[in-house]
């Protein structure tokens, strides 16, 4: 069991320094920080000194937790969710730290699937603020994500979590979460994303993500490509860290489990999770096979190729890079065949490979509803997306919308019962539309499972407009 919180007295909050913020004031203070999810970070912005300085003033709560640290280009959130679900099914109290959130910031910090409450969040931010202000008197401002990370570590300590699953925000080496010393470090895979911050080659990106590897700490890697795989292996060797590579045997083992998440790519994530669970067993956690089966079958991770309705088929998704878009399309072809037209509501951030994403999507979807999310300056304009689609051969049909809500209303009015409608391109877009989509889907009255996956090795048709 983890030790008591910083006050060393469970349930007793530390005394506030100065004026205590209300919930609304605390959120306003937090959201007033520099937020690199809105304004793209530069490589020089990525440092750990501020994070360490804040945590030192809070008693280094991260050093008093048992942790799993997870990075990767895609699948890291799903892998974290699988791990948390299994460990919880085994009877442990599990913290889960992820980003970004879909609808409310409290989703980022959960214990046994329950987001941090308003009173708890208020208390944590009031505790963190004096440390932040002291650090800022000596240097640059503390960021939104750094405060998020501190909230997570503190909350998991106050709630006496037996284990915390920590998802990296960006990269790994200089991510704010990389101040912890985990039981296991996990790298799901390497792909092209955040290249302005992490580098333009897979090997450079792999080096940044491999920065979470600590001396002597086991590392689980699901990477298959030779170049980045060798980078991860070399960093593990330099750190004298036992390296567990997820191979064919682990992927075949993952086929035996029923998964609560859609998509054959989730089998790869499950294989990484299974290898990580074995490392946790070696670290002393009791994780029986029954908990593994229950946890993987019951795992829920909203807006990850989530089917909200059939007839018409409505998919809510957060794919925001090329590998995730490819996984989405593979899953739609396998598990959601449709005889009707295919509609997509799409918005994307400017630091993504959106020309390649659009090229892939245009080979599958018939109708595009191009829009933007909120007032985020990172969002690509619908007009620019339209220029790229207009150059495709053959050119798909597309319409432009000034808001995500307007795009939704037009798309939902246009779909026929035999059609498919997918929301994708950004976590921010999915978050903005999820409440409306869930309400319109009427999922409680119209549940329908996806088409069962075919046996492993069955060819998938990838021809244009294939079913």
Image (spheres, rainbow, N blue to C red):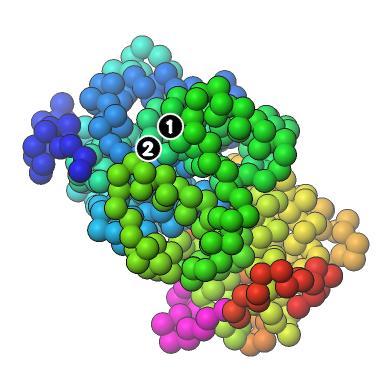
Front residue of 399/261: it is 261
Q: Is residue 136 visible?
A: yes
Q: Earlier in the sequence, mark 2 or mark 1?
A: 2
> Where's residue 415, x and y in %?
66, 81
Residue depicted at 69% across the width and 66% down the height: 330
* SS label for mark 2: loop
Query: Which quadrant of the structure image shows residue 337?
Result: bottom right
Image height check: is 440 above or below 212? below
The numbered dot on residue 286 is: none
Crowding at label 1, few (<14), some or many (≥20) Cα neighbours within 10 Å? Answer: some
Image quarter in which the C terminus is found: bottom right
Q: Are marks 2 and 1 in contact (CB under 8 Å)?
A: yes
Q: Is residue 70 left or right of residue 424?
A: left
Kindly identify which residue carries mark 2.
183
Residue 185 rendering spot, x and y as whole percentages: 46, 38
Q: Name the spot of residue 360 as percent of width and height, x first.
A: 77, 59
Viewer-nearest residue: 309 or 2: 2
- Along the line of sight, the residue nearer the viewer: 180 or 141: 180
| Prevailing SS of the magenta stretch | loop
Q: Which residues are magenta?
A: 436-450
Task: Please tell me whether residue 444 is drawn above or below residue 87 in the rendered image.
Answer: below
Q: Is residue 437 magenta?
A: yes
Image point (67%, 46%), residue name: 224
Q: On the image, numbered disc 1 is attached to which residue?
A: 217
Secondary-structure class at tag 1 = loop
For this view, does 451 lie left or right of residue 13?
right
Residue 151 point in image, percent of width and height: 30, 38
Query: Is any atom of residue 29 visible in this view?
Result: no
On-image quarter of the N terminus: top left
Membership of 446 in magenta stretch:
yes
């Amino acid at each position: 069991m983890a030790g008591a919180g910083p006050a060393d007295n469970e349930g007793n909050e530390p005394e506030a320094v100065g004026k205590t913020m209300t919930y609304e004031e605390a959120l306003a203070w937090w959201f007033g920080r520099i937020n690199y999810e809105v304004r793209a970070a530069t490589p020089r912005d990525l440092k750990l000194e501020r994070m360490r300085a804040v945590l030192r003033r809070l008693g280094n709560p991260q050093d008093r937790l048992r942790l799993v640290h997870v990075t990767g280009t895609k699948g890291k959130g799903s892998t974290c969710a699988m791990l948390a679900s299994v460990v919880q099914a085994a009877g442990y109290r599990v913290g889960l730290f992820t980003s970004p959130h879909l609808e409310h910031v409290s989703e980022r910090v959960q214990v046994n699937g329950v987001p941090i409450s308003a009173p708890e969040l208020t208390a944590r931010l009031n505790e963190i603020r004096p440390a932040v202000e002291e650090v800022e008197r000596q240097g640059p401002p503390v960021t939104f994500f750094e405060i998020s990370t501190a909230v997570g570590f503190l909350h998991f300590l106050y709630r006496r979590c037996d284990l915390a699953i920590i998802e990296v925000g960006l990269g790994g080496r200089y991510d704010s979460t990389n101040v912890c010393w985990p039981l296991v470090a996990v790298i799901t895979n390497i792909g092209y994303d955040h290249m302005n911050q992490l580098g333009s080659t897979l090997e450079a990106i792999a080096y940044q993500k491999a920065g979470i590897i600590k001396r002597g700490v086991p590392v689980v890697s699901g990477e298959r490509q030779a170049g980045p795989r060798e980078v991860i292996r070399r960093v593990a060797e330099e750190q004298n860290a036992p390296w567990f590579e997820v191979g064919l045997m682990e992927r075949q083992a993952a086929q035996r489990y029923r998964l609560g998440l859609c998509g054959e790519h989730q089998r790869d994530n499950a294989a990484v999770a299974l290898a990580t669970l074995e490392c946790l067993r070696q670290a002393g956690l009791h994780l029986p096979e029954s908990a593994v089966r229950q946890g993987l079958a019951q795992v829920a991770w909203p807006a990850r190729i989530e089917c909200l309705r059939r007839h018409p088929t409505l998919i809510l998704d957060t794919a925001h890079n090329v590998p995730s878009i490819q996984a989405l399309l593979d899953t739609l072809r396998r598990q959601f065949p449709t005889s009707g037209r295919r509609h997509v509501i799409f918005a994307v951030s400017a630091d993504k490979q959106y020309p390649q994403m659009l090229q892939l999507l245009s080979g599958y979807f018939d109708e595009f509803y191009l829009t933007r999310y909120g007032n985020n300056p990172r969002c690509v304009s619908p007009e620019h997306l339209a220029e790229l689609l207009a150059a495709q051969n053959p050119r798909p049909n597309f319409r432009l919308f000034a808001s995500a809500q307007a795009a939704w209303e037009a798309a939902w009015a246009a779909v026929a019962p035999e059609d498919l409608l997918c929301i994708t391109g950004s976590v921010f877009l999915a978050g903005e539309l999820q409440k409306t989509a869930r309400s319109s889907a009427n999922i409680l009255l119209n549940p329908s499972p996806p088409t069962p996956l075919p046996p492993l090795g069955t060819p998938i048709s990838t021809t244009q407009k294939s079913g």
